[in-house]
Image: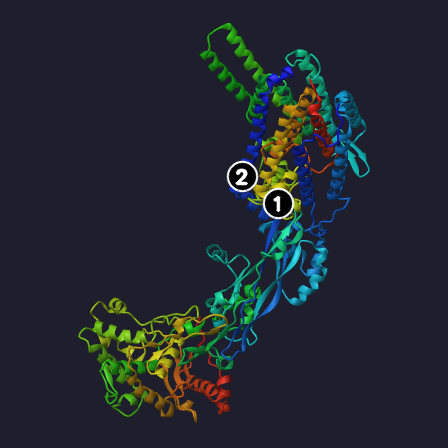
Amino acid sequence: MRLRKSIFQGVDWFIVLMYLALVILGWLNIYAANYDDEKEGVISFSRENGKQLIFIGTALFLALVILILDPNFFSAFAYGIYGIVLILLVAVYFGGTEIKGSKSWFRFGEFGFQPAEFAKFATALALAKYLSGMNIRLQRLKTKIISLIIILVPFLVILKQNETGTALVYSAFAFVLYREGLSGNILLIGFFIALLAIFALLFDEWILVGILGGVALMIFLFMKKRWGNFLKILAGFLVCSGIVFGVDFAFNKLHDYQKKRVNVWLGKERDSKSKKDEYYNVHQSLVAIGSGGATGKGFLQGTQTKFKYVPEQSTDFIFCTIGEEWGFLGSATFLLIYLGLILRIFWVAEKQRSIFSRIFGYGVASILFMHLTVNVGMTLGLAPVIGIPLPFISYGGSSLWGFTIMLFIFVKLDSHRLEIFR
Amino acid sequence: MSSSNAYSDRKIVLALIVIAVVLVFIIRLFYIQIINDEYKVTATNQAFRYVPVYPARGNVFDRNGKRLVFNQSAFDLMVIPNQIKELDTLQFCSVTGISRETFLKKMEKAYKEGKRRASVFEKELSVESAARIQEKLYMFPGFYFQERTLRKYPMSIAAHILGYVGEVSPEIVDTSRYYRMGDYIGISGIEKSYEKYLRGIRGTKIIMVDVHNREKGSFMDGALDTAAVAGQDLYTTLDLDLQLYAEDLLKNKTGSIVAIEPATGEILVLATSPSYDPNLLVGSLRAQNYPVLEKDSTKPLYNRATMASYPPGSTFKILGALIGQQEGVIKPETRYPCSFTVGPKSIHCHPHPSPADLSQSIQYSCNPYYCRLFINTINKFRKTEEGYLNWKSHVNSFGFGVKLGSDIPHELRGNIPSVQYYDRYHGKGRWKAASVYSLGIGQGEIGITPLQMANYSAIIANRGYYYIPHIGKKIEGGEIDSRFKERKYTTIDSVYFNVVVDAMYQVVEAGTGRGGKLSGIPYCGKTGTAQNPHGKDHSIYISFAPKDNPKIALAVYIENGGFGAEWAVPISSLIIEKYIAGKITRPDMEKRMLEGVVLPPKKIK
C-alpha cells in the first residue's frame, strides 16, 4: 500500500460537491418551511432549523471519520455491521418508542434514533460482501436464495415495525441484482405483476379474470395446438388469476389509512376535502407545487408551505417547499442535480476494480433512486402517499446520518480504487 | 477483470430507467406549474383573503359651497362562521344587546352565505355602540368590525334631487365589472346620476391566512394592496337657502317650485311637496322607512317637479303668441274680438277692453283671442295635419312633450298629443283645428311638468333659447357633461319675444299677477289655471326677474290652489324677492303663505 498524502486523496469531488449542495439546499428549505413571520427566522436549537444544523454538523463529522478509517474495514466488517443493525432493529421493535403508529424509534430526550435508516447501507454492505465472494455466481439458485435472505430479513423486520415506506425501499436491490447478472425477465415479470396488481385494485377481480381468460384463449388460437402450449397458457392464466385474487386479499389486510392512500393515488377517492382525508395531503401538495409557477414565489415567500397548508412539510413533503418557492426552474434544477448524483455514482461504481465496491456503489445509487422516485412521485401525485424521506433534504438526524454514512463509505472505497490490483 | 463484468452493459439500462423517471417528474412539474392554472387559483383562494376597503362617497355642496350631503362613519359587525371558537352566546348577546333568537337567526344566515366567508352580522352600528362592543370583541374570535360610511343630510332638504344610496343588487353585480356584493350604489337622484364620480374607487387589502384561518399579515407587506380612493365632491347648482325657503313655502300644500338661472340652465330650486326627510332613507333605516313612505296616500316619494304633468292653462298663451308671430299669422297690432263660438260652444272671458291687441290679450289672458289664433295658425296650412305638425314642432322646440335630458333621473316628458292620437280619436282626416282649439289656451290633452314649465319661463327670459336644466355644477377633478353648456335655440326668432315680455311685465304691473308686484324689482309673469276634474283647479305661475338680464326664472304649482293669483303669484314673488333682494319686505304675506294650508279635496270613498 502506498503512503497517502491526505485523507482526501482520490476522493470524487463531484459526488462530494453534489452532496454538499443537496444538504445546503435541504437546510434552506427546512428553514423556509418553518419560517414564521412573527418569530422572523430565528435559528434555535429547539426548532427544526437549528436541530438540522446539528445533524448536518455531526453528519459531516461522520463523513470525516469514514474517510479516516481503513478502506478494508467496511469489507471486513460488512457482516458485523449488518448483524449489529439487525439486533438494533429487533431491539427497537420491543424496546423502542412508538411514534405515529410505528415502533422504530429509540428516544434520547430531544432526539430520536431510527435504526431502520442505518439498515439500508448495512444491507448493501452485506449483499456486496456476499456477492463479491469467491466462486459466487448469481446464476446459481443457492446464491439467489441467500441474496434474497440478506435483503428480506431487514425488510420483514422493518415491515413489522410499521415502516412500510422504508421497507419498500428494499426493492431497490433488484437493480443491484440485475446489474450483477439476474435475468432481466425477473425484472419484467416483477413489472408485470405490479401492473396486474394495479389493475386488480382498479377493477372488479372477476371482470379482470374474464379478460385474462379471453387473452389466454386468443393466444392459444394463434399458437400451434399442442398439449404443451395449452398447459403453459393454462398455467400462466391460473398464476395471473391467483395474483389478482391475492392482491385483493392482501389489500384488505392493509390498514384503513393505507387503503385510502392507495385509493386516492388510483383516483378512486378524491371528493372529500376534509383535513383528515388522505386526499387533502396530496391535493395540498399539488397546490403548493403548482402555485410556484415558472420561477417560484421566492425564498421564504411560499404561502402554502409557510402557513402549514401542506402536512409534514419539512420531512416527507419537503419537495413542496422547493416547488412552491423555487418554481419549475428551481425544482427541475434540483431534480437534475439529483439525477447527476445518481448517474455519477453508477459511473464511478462501474469503474471499480473491486467487485465489493461496485456492488455497494450500485446499492447506494439504487437506494437513492428509490427514495427519490417514491418521495417526489408522492408529492406530485404520481405515487401513493408513502412516508419516506428525500435523502439529504428532509429534516431528520437518523436519515441524514444513514445516507451520509452510506454515500461516504462509497466515496472512501472509490478513493482507494487504484490501489486494488486484481 | 471480474467475470460478472459481462453484464456491464446493463448500466445503460439502469441509467435509462433513472433518466426516464426524472424526465417524467420534470414533465409533470411542467404541467402542474406552468400549463395548469387550477393550483394557482386554489392557492390564492385558500391563502389570501381579499378584504375590501370601502371609499368615502363624495360630499355634495350647494352652489355656494354649503354642505348638502356628507358622510358619517358606521361599523358593520362581520362574522366568519368557521372561525368562531367556544362562543359564549349569553355573553355575546348581552354585549351586543341582541336576543338569543336574533343571534341564532343571524348565525343561520351567516352560515348559509358560507362558512369560510365573511358576512355581515349586524349592520351599521354607530361609532359609539361599535366602540362599546369593540372593547369586548377579543373574547369572540371570528367577529370583527368593518368601517363603512353612511350619508348624512344636515338640512333635511331636497330629498328627491339628492336621492339615496343602498347596497348594490345582485342583478347589477352580475352585469357590472366594478360592483361586488356589499358595495353601495346611488339608487335615485343625483346619487344615481353622478354615481361614477361620487362612489370613489374601492380598495383591496390582501391578507394572508394560515391553514387555521389565522391572519398572517399583509401579502408582500401590502405592496399589492390598493388603497381606496375617496369619491369626488360634487357642487350642485342648488341654492341651499332658497331651496329651504321654497320647501317651507310649500309646507301643508301639494305642488312644486322649480327655479332656474336662465343664463346657465342651472337649477336653483327644485322643491316638491309633500316630501320627506332624506335621513330616513339612510342605510338600514331605509328598509323600515321606505315601505311606510311608499304606502303614504300623499305620495311623498313622488317627485312632482319632474314627473307630474299638468295642463299648462293660460301660461301656454305666451307660446301661442310667439308661434303666431313667427308664422306671420298675427302682428303685435292684430286685434281679435273677445268672443268665440265653435258649434254650440262659446268661449267665455272675463271683462276687459275688447277687441284686445296682442299685448292686452296676454295682460288680460283673453281666451277667445287664443282659440282664434290657434285655429288661424293651424289653418295657415291647407291640410289640418300639416298645420298641426308645424305647430307641434314649435311646441317641441320649447322642450314640451320631450325629455329635457337633465341630470335628474326619473324625468318625464309630459305630453303633446300626436297626429296619430287625434286620428284615432276623431278618425283620420276627420278632425279640424276647431276640434282641438282648446290646445290654444293650454287645456285638453297637454301635459307639462313643472321642470319643463320653469325651463319655458327661462326661454322667455332669454328671449328664445335655453340650456338644459341641470343640478351638477362642478365636480372636483371632473367635468360636467358638455351638453349642459350648449345653447338650445327654439324655433322662434328672438325679436318676437319683446312684445310678450312687455306684456308679461304688464301682467305683474297691472294684470293677474299684480298681487306679487315688487317695488324695485321689475319682473314678468303669467298666471295659469290647470283645470282639475277632481276638484279645485291647480294654481300655476311662471315668472322671471328682473325683466332685463333675468337672474331667475320660476314655475310654481300649487295643486287645488284655485286661480294663479291666490297662491302661486305671492309665493313666486317671495322667492324672487328673497333671491334678488335678499330680504322680505312683506312679512304679512310671507306669514300668510308659510302658514297657509291648501289641502286636496277629501276623497269620496
Q: Give SS at disc 1.
A: helix
Q: Is residue B470 left or right of residue A341?
A: left
Q: Which residue is mark 2?
A: B30
Q: How many marks?
A: 2
Q: Are marks 2 and 1 on the same chain?
A: no
The foreground one among A303 and B327 is: A303
Q: Which residue does the image show at 59% across and 25% down from the upper left?
A: B14
Q: If the image is split into quadrants, where does the N terminus of chain B sit?
A: top right
Residue B192: % across, % down: 47, 66
Q: If the image is split into quadrants, where does the C terminus of chain B sit?
A: bottom left
Residue sitting farthest toward the left:
B382
Q: Which residue does the image show at 70% across and 49% down from the upper left?
A: A36
Q: Give SS at disc 2.
A: helix
The foreground one among A287 and B321 is: A287
Q: Which residue is mark 1?
A: A325
Name the chain under label 1. A
Residue B459: % across, % down: 35, 80
Residue B575: % across, % down: 46, 85
- CB within 8 Å, label 2 to label 1: no
At label 2, counting other C-alpha atoms closer than 10 Å, the crowd grade (few under 14, some 14-19, many 20 or more) is many
Quarter occupied by residue A341: top right
Q: Please state which amino acid type lies under the numbered disc 2.
A: Phe
At label 1, counting other C-alpha atoms closer than 10 Å, the crowd grade (few under 14, some 14-19, many 20 or more) is many
In the displayed structure, would residue A170 be above or below residue B211? above
Q: Please state which amino acid type lies under the numbered disc 1.
A: Glu
